[in-house]
Amino acid sequence: MSEPTSTKPYMIRAIYEWCVDNGLTPHLMVLVDGGTRVPMGFVKDGEIVFNINYSAIKGLQMENDAITFSARFNGVPQNIYIPINAVKGIFARENGQGMFFDPEQSPSPPISGGAPPNPKKKPSLKLVK
């Protein structure tokens, strides 16, 4: 019997939908490492926070292994790739409610060709109110 899929991507999608259903602005907090593709000029202390509201980005895909979308930074469109293990939290900008995740592993080394790694480590979750 194979190991079940992590609950983390399902929780991320659920909090995203909760934000949208309640007219709140979903934000994604990401730990930047060798597996993420983000604009490095906007990274602070190894992290970046994205407004992932439908009006701020295009082509949002929340899969079980990664989140992808296109966003503009200083007017320049960029394709963003975030492995699920790099997501530190998802929350509403207006009230800070959402879910934050304990770190899963140390940052990955830079990728030399091919797709970013897809570790199967289970996340720990904690609810933040």
Image: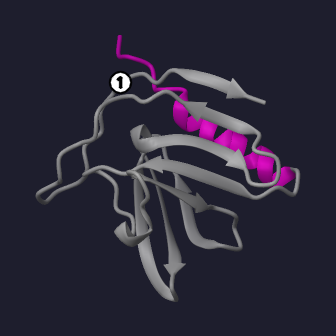
Residue drawn at point x = 44 percent, y = 58 percent:
44
Q: The residue tagged with tag 1: helix, strand or loop? A: loop
* Disc 1 packing (10 Å; few <14; some 14–19; many ≥20): few
Q: Position of residue 47 (x, y in %)?
A: 44, 52
- From the image, tell me which residue sits under label 1: 121
Q: Nearer the viewer, residue 21 or 103?
A: 103
Residue at the extreme top: 1
Residue at the extreme right: 22
Q: Position of residue 88 (x, y in %)?
A: 51, 40
Q: Main secondary structure of the magenta part?
A: helix
**Kind of residue indicated by mark 1:** Lys
Residue drawn at point x = 28 percent, y = 33 percent:
106
Q: How many marks?
A: 1
Q: Quadrant of the C terminus?
A: top right
Q: Quadrant of the N terminus?
A: top left
* Image: magenta residue range: 1-21
